[in-house]
């Protein structure tokens, strides 16, 4: 399998990331260390889980992170509102010589994750951490969104194969390419996207379009010509004129194929009352002796439509899901954020940082964070605790829910796994990313270990997750101090760890 070739550069970022890096450099603090986290506040699609995805793509970006001379020249061409260069030559020399020196930890692809848990932790020189923000958010937000949508669609299909084929309506060519990868990790069995098939080793699938049927004088001729051209790839699209007549024509041509030593794969229904049509098509195919022929369904499908069709006993074998999967409808984005948790002078102690907001959900979390998942011996999830790495986590562990403040006590000696794993150390890759098949299987295992009530399409129950007690108490103290500082702006609040 060939590695992915994304169109990344050091300029895969927003202007303000570079202006902030310049500011750190001019202030002489660009080598102060910082701890940032990629997190998100809400699960997508009204659900109660998210599938982490995008780490392998992020690794591709990070391994090649370096400003080229062409990119330096572009930055040198930027002007401020006085017409003078936006960036001085000293800062551009700093970027020219910059090499990644960050420690980066992340949650492996395919892991089920939940709001406020860090998907990625970045620790290193503040200017470098800042420059990575936009690309990491772009990668994790989109791929996690699509992997989650795919998982929901595949669960609705109840283990029937689901084929992703939304490239033509994807958010750009790269969006379609990336979506195919994420959808496969989320559970899809294949894709129509040949580029993704080549790069990632995903099984590709495709039939013919209505234009093929319409080109010929009649549907039967179109099927016969396709069978002559592609006798080992015959799935006939039967709804161009009349679906039932289309099934009859497909059966006739399938008989000819069989005489020549080939078997029709099946028929595709793309419109109409697909429940009733599938039931009748299955009866006709079986009666004609084509009991192994597949019925493929497509046409603006999503998890809710599929679940409803299954409930009504549709005889569908394979589901082709395009637009609503590949574009993550109805949610446009996961809504991931990149927040600063702590800073320190080189060789100094961490100073915690917290962002306040009138919206309680937007108040950030201090420190350098890790997630501990408690589970049964067989892997079934019990609860997750977000904790601060320097404070550690006690036994028994007390988890405080972020919104409700409800407490959960996890008994000592409960099985657990810490989710964030080392990926880069001082800019050097120390993690071997699993291949896409392993990540896909891991996602399937994760779904099988999750509490069933959180996976329901309708009225799913929330998963137990919260802050480990010492982190909850630290956050509460910092919120109180920050509010006091706001009331007394001339007094400096001390956030140093040593004072806690």
Image: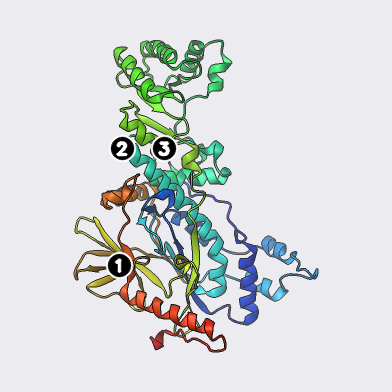
**Residue shown at 45% from the left, 47% from the top:** 146
Residue at the spot x=53%, y=43% of the render? 176
In the rendered image, which quarter contains the N terminus?
Answer: top left
Q: Residue 424 is drawn in which quadrant?
A: bottom left
Q: Considering only order in the chain, which callout, 2 or 1, is on the residue closer to the N terminus?
A: 2
Query: Residue 406, labelled with which disc?
Result: 1
* Above or below for 56 versus 384: above
Work out whether residue 113 or residue 311 is closer to the camera in this orientation and state it: 311
SS assignment at label 1 = loop
Where does the image place residue 470, in percent across and percent down from the top left?
33, 77
Sequence-first tag of 3 and 2: 2
Q: Secondary structure at mark 3?
A: strand
Q: Residue at x 57, y 67 (%)?
A: 131
On residue 158, the disc is 2
* Circle 2: element type: loop
Is residue 153 something one can see in this rendering? yes
Q: Residue at x 35, y 17 (%)?
A: 280
Query: Which residue position is annotated with label 3?
Result: 190
């Amino acid at each position: 399998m060939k590695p992915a070739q994304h169109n990344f550069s050091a300029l895969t970022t927003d202007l303000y990331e570079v202006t902030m890096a310049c500011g750190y450099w001019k202030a002489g603090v660009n080598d102060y260390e910082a701890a940032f986290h990629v997190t998100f506040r809400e699960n997508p699609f009204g659900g109660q889980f998210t599938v982490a995805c995008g780490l392998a793509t992020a690794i591709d970006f990070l391994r090649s992170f370096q400003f080229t001379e062409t990119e330096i020249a572009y930055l040198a061409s930027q002007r401020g509102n006085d017409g003078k260069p936006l960036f001085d030559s000293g800062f551009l020399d700093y970027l020219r010589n910059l090499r990644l020196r960050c420690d980066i930890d992340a949650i492996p692809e395919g892991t089920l994750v939940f709001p406020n848990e860090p998907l990625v932790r970045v620790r290193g020189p503040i200017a470098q951490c800042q420059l990575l923000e936009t690309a990491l958010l772009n990668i994790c937000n989109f791929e996690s969104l699509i992997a989650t949508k795919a998982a929901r669609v595949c669960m609705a299909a109840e283990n029937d194969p689901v084929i992703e084929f939304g490239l033509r309506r994807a958010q750009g060519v790269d969006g379609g390419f990336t979506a195919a990868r994420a959808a496969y990790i989320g559970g899809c069995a294949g894709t129509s996207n040949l580029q993704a098939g080549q790069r990632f080793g995903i099984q590709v699938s495709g039939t013919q379009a209505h234009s093929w049927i319409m080109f010929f004088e009649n549907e039967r001729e179109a099927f016969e010509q396709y069978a002559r051209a592609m006798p080992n790839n015959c799935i006939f699209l039967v709804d161009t004129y009349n679906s039932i007549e289309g099934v009859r024509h497909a059966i006739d041509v399938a008989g000819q194929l069989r005489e020549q030593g080939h078997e029709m794969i099946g028929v595709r229904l793309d419109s109409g009352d697909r429940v009733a049509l599938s039931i009748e098509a299955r009866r006709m195919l079986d009666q004609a002796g084509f009991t192994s022929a597949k019925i493929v369904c497509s046409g603006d499908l999503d998890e809710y439509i599929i679940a409803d069709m299954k409930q009504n006993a549709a005889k569908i074998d394979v589901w082709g899901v395009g637009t609503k999967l590949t574009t993550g409808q109805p949610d446009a984005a996961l809504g991931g954020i990149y927040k600063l948790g702590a800073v320190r002078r080189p060789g100094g102690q961490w100073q915690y940082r917290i962002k306040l907001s009138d919206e309680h959900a937007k108040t950030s979390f201090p420190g350098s964070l890790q997630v501990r998942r408690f589970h049964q011996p067989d892997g079934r999830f019990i609860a997750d605790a977000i904790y601060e790495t320097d404070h550690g986590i006690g036994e028994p562990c007390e988890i405080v829910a972020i919104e409700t403040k409800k407490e959960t006590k996890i008994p000592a000696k409960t099985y657990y796994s810490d989710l964030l794993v080392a990926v880069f150390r001082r800019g050097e890759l120390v993690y071997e990313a699993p291949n896409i098949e392993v990540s896909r299987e891991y996602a399937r295992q994760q779904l099988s270990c999750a509490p069933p009530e959180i996976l329901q399409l309708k009225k799913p129950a929330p998963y137990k997750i919260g802050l480990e007690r010492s982190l909850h108490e630290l956050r509460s103290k910092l919120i109180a101090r920050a509010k006091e500082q706001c009331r007394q702006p001339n007094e400096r609040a001390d956030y140093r760890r040593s004072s806690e």
